[in-house]
Structures are given as C-alpha cells and as structure tokens.
Image (tube, grey):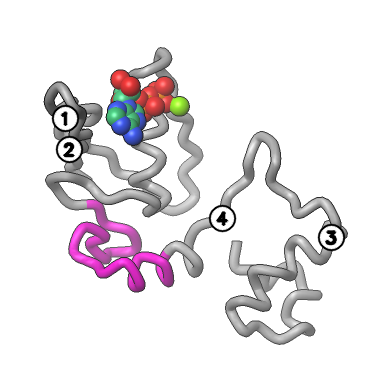
Amino acid sequence: MDVTKTYSLENGDFTALNHVSLDIIENDFVAIMGSSGSGKSTMMNQEEILDVPTMGNLYIEGRNVAKMTELERSHLRCDTIGYIFQKLSPIPLQSAYENVEYPLILKNKTHDATRNADRLPF
Ligand SMILES: Nc1ncnc2c1ncn2[C@@H]1O[C@H](COP(=O)(O)OP(=O)(O)O)[C@@H](O)[C@H]1O
Ligand SMILES: [Mg+2]
C-alpha cells in the first residue's frame, strides 16, 4: 500500500494521508492509533474500501483497489471485509442471528450455510 488522500476544500486542498505505506498480512492483529485529526478514519476508509486513494495503490488479496470500478469494490468489500462497530451496528428489530444472516442472504448464501459458524465468511 502506498496511499495519498487529498480532500478538496473551498480554500484549497488538504492532504490527510501522504504516501502512507502499510502491509497487513493474514492473521495480523493491528491497531491504528494517533491523535484526533491524524488521519485514522481516512486510513480506515481506504482499508475498508469505502473511499479510494487520490494517488497510489492499495492491494487487498493481491488486487489493486485503486484500479477497480465501484461495483468491483462493492463485491470485494462484501466478500472480504467484516465490520464490528462501536455502536449503532445491529438492526434493532432483528435477532442476533438475523443480523448475521442478513448480509449472507444478500450474498445468496443458503440458509443452512449460515447455521455453520465455521463457514461464516467473516
Ligand atoms: N471529508 C473530509 N473533507 C475534508 N477534510 C477531511 C474530511 N475527512 C477528514 N478530513 C480532515 O482530514 C484530517 C484527518 O481526519 P480523520 O481521518 O478524520 O482523522 P482521525 O480519524 O485520526 O481523527 C483532519 O484534518 C480532517 O479535518
Ligand atoms: Mg476518526
């Protein structure tokens, strides 16, 4: 990864990430720490494929996110990334099971597959 992210503001550009390089390999446990405004959320938005770099490349499972279409990024996000939010994450009218099941239904997984926790894709 070698990522630069510049936000365009009314009074000029602001570079929040300037050639940031980071490798995270399978089974790594990584914490991103820094003071408020240092770019943690901007960085996470790149890692989660919610945003794309202004410049540079970001590889997830060997594929360069920066060169993908929005639809390709959506599929990669759906297949490879799981989120645990601090708050506001579960759909409140659904059970815990239904909350887990919901994205799998969107991915056309069979109902039986969702019952086997070992086979959950996240
Ligand atoms: N959408 C945006 N538009 C313009 N500037 C932004 C935007 N998001 C973040 N920034 C700026 O980028 C810098 C990094 O912000 P952010 O990634 O939210 O930091 P952190 O999560 O570490 O607090 C801050 O100066 C912030 O004001
Ligand atoms: Mg933040």
Q: Position of residue 80 (x, y in %)?
A: 47, 63
Q: Work out whether residue 41 or residue 24 is closer to the camera in this orientation and state it.
A: 41
Q: Is residue 118 magenta?
A: no
Q: Is residue 39 visible?
A: no
The secondary element bearing badge 3 is classed as: loop
Q: Amino acid at mark 4?
A: Gly
Q: Which mark is residue 94?
A: 3
Q: Which residue is mark 4?
A: 82
Rendered image: mark on residue 90:
none
Nearest to viewer (mark 2 / mark 4): 2
Q: Earlier in the sequence, mark 4 or mark 1?
A: 1
Query: Hey, what amino acid is under mark 3?
Result: Gln
Per the rendering, the mark at residue 18 is 1
Range covered by the magenta-colored residues: 58-76
Reply above or below: 110 against 48. Answer: below
Please indicate whether residue 85 sits to the left or right of residue 20 in the image. right
Look at the image and say whether residue 63 sits in the magenta stretch: yes
Quadrant that contains the C terminus = bottom right
Answer yes or no: do the residues labelled 2 and 1 have beta carbons within 8 Å? Answer: yes
Give the answer, above or below, for where 26 lies relative to 42. Answer: below
